[in-house]
Image (cartoon, rainbow, N blue to C red):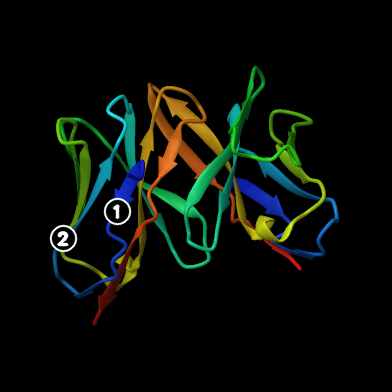
Amino acid sequence: DTAVSQTPKYLVTQMGNDKSIKCEQNLGHDTMYWYKQDSKKFLKIMFSYNNKELIINETVPNRFSPKSPDKAHLNLHINSLELGDSAVYFCASRKRTGGRFEQYFGPGTRLTVT
Amino acid sequence: RKEVEQDPGPFNVPEGATVAFNCTYSNSASQSFFWYRQDCRKEPKLLMSVYSSGNEDGRFTAQLNRASQYISLLIRDSKLSDSATYLCVVKGYNNNDMRFGAGTRLTVKP
């Protein structure tokens, strides 16, 4: 069974549209993340979220908003898509065991804005 | 200076070779260190955490040098299946403070 799942896997859309990417984890973790991996392969954290706090990376445009209906889901909503938003978006969740820190990534959503 | 720097490679090595990657980080207050592996068009997967005393997992050995602010990964007896991009990851105090290197690409050839 997939631990962290994302839908859709591929998303092609036009500039100016609004879209959402869904993420679900069945690991019982309480912290989830969104990352962006651009064409140069740099992975950058966008948000981290648990049931107590949302931390937003200050470089993320406010067109991006995470929405968490419950502990197992963290969706990413993007308004007014721009060409520069084209990238692979990864969701992740975190396990913390005895002070150790492990992240599990979803398979990614490849977003192409035309 | 980038926060986390890695030699992008590519490293092309024959099967059975030993290969080492280094990674340097700029924030001396960094708390936790990791190596992730990412296959082409796949998600990153945790390979191993890096502890101050150094740690080994099978053919993989990770070392941390806080004084010089670098992390290393040594792969012994390389297998074809080790071909991937290896990402160095450095974490600070809070949940959001995760910095990824751009990755080092390894290709192991028969």
- In this view, the residue farthest toward the front is B1
Tell me the quarter of the picture where residue A102 sits.
top left
* Residue B76 tag number: 2
* Residue positioned 75% across, 29% down in the render: A70
Along the line of sight, the residue nearer the viewer: A6 or B57: A6
Name the residue carrying label 1: B6
- Dot 2 amino acid type: Arg
Residue A6 at x, y = what percent?
A: 68, 51
Q: Quadrant of the C terminus of chain A?
A: bottom right
Tell me the quarter of the picture where residue A113 sits.
bottom right
- Dot 1 amino acid type: Gln
- In this view, the residue farthest toward the bottom is B110
For marks 1 and 2 on the same chain, the one whose residue lies earlier in the sequence: 1
- In this view, the residue farthest toward the top is A52
Left or right of B63, for residue A3 = right
Query: Where B3 sits versus A6, above or below?
Result: above
Q: Secondary structure at mark 1?
A: strand
Residue B86 at x, y = what percent?
A: 34, 56
Query: Where A24 sits versus B52, above or below?
Result: below
Left or right of A95, for residue B5 = left
Q: Chain of mark 1?
A: B
Callouts 1 and 2 on one subunit: yes
Residue A98 in sight: yes
* Residue B48 tag number: none
Left or right of B10, for residue B38 = right
* Residue positioned 39% across, 27% down in the render: B92
Along the line of sight, the residue nearer the viewer: B61 or B102: B102
* Residue positioned 22% across, 43% down in the render: B71
